[in-house]
Image (spheres, rainbow, N blue to C red):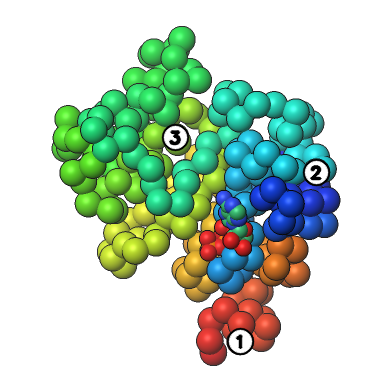
Amino acid sequence: MTLLHIQIAEASYDTIPVLHDIDLQINEGAFIAVIGANTAGKSTLLKSISGLMPNVKGTISLSGENLLHLPAHEIPARGVAHVPEGRHVFPFMSVEENLWLGGYCRRHNETALRATLEKIYVMFPRLAERSKQLAGTLSGGEQQMVAIGRALMGDPKLLLLDEPSHGLAPKIVQELHDAFLEIHQSGVTTLLVEQNTKLALSVASEAFVLQAGHVVLQGKSSDLLHDPRIREAYLGI
Ligand code: ATP
């Protein structure tokens, strides 16, 4: 069943168009990588879904509701969580305070929030150990865990991950990818933007390729990994 139907005629910054003629259907429970070169429009696509792009022409429908008709602050309560590029944790707040902020849209259900917090601490034990530490003093990988945990506190149906591995050591990247698989297995539909094409295709089950703001290829990750166009353009093989 389709969870998200993205139909973007055009998305632009001021008058400069970045995305055009996109029509994508994303099934409930899918784990999809969005790959493409720098400036292809990957982050812009995620921002369009989470309401952070003011100029989007088209329809982005989540379970039949057009998200483009909603202000950005109402979108998390519809079940969309965005982990932005660069993490953007609140540096002068503790790990736990950062996490609680992610649950704002569920603030009337403290019992459920506490249960989610416990699950996040099981997924990322380092966050439990550092729950009182200021988020700004954590390593890059730990800050990424906070950003992901903060998104999960909203109990999302759809998780948007923008370059979560950027600048992190391989061991941490592996830990994060194990967490993504666990999140996916729990039923959360996931869109992963990743510069590292090989990594993205090894963790997500499907992928689409953005080129100059347009989807040029899509399919199963295992097929794309062997596609000569992908191997030549993005894997350098
Ligand atoms: P990267 O991996 O480099 O982040 P990307 O595929 O995510 O690339 P976007 O960040 O979506 O690409 O950028 C697409 C285009 O939009 C680029 O040409 C970029 O310069 C432009 N752009 C991005 N953000 C803004 C902004 N706030 N104002 C104006 N133009 C922008």
Q: Helix, strand, or loop for circle 3?
A: helix
Mark 3 to mark 1: distance in Å? 36 Å
What's under tag 3, amino acid-wise?
A: Leu
Q: Helix, strand, or loop for circle 1?
A: helix
Quadrant of image for the C terminus: bottom right
What's under tag 2, amino acid-wise?
A: Lys
* Disc 3 C-beta below 8 A from ligand 1: no
For the view shown, which residue lies furthest in the bottom direction? 237
Indicate left or right for 142 with 88 as reference.
Answer: left
**Looking at the picture, how far across and down is residue 64, in whole percent?**
79, 31
| 78 and 22: which is toward the camera | 22
Mark 3 to mark 2: distance in Å? 29 Å
Q: Residue 65 carries which label?
A: none
User: Which residue bears the numbered disc 3?
Assistant: 152
- Which one is earlier in the sequence, the residue at label 3 or at label 1? 3
- Which residue appears at 32% of the width and 35% of the height? 90
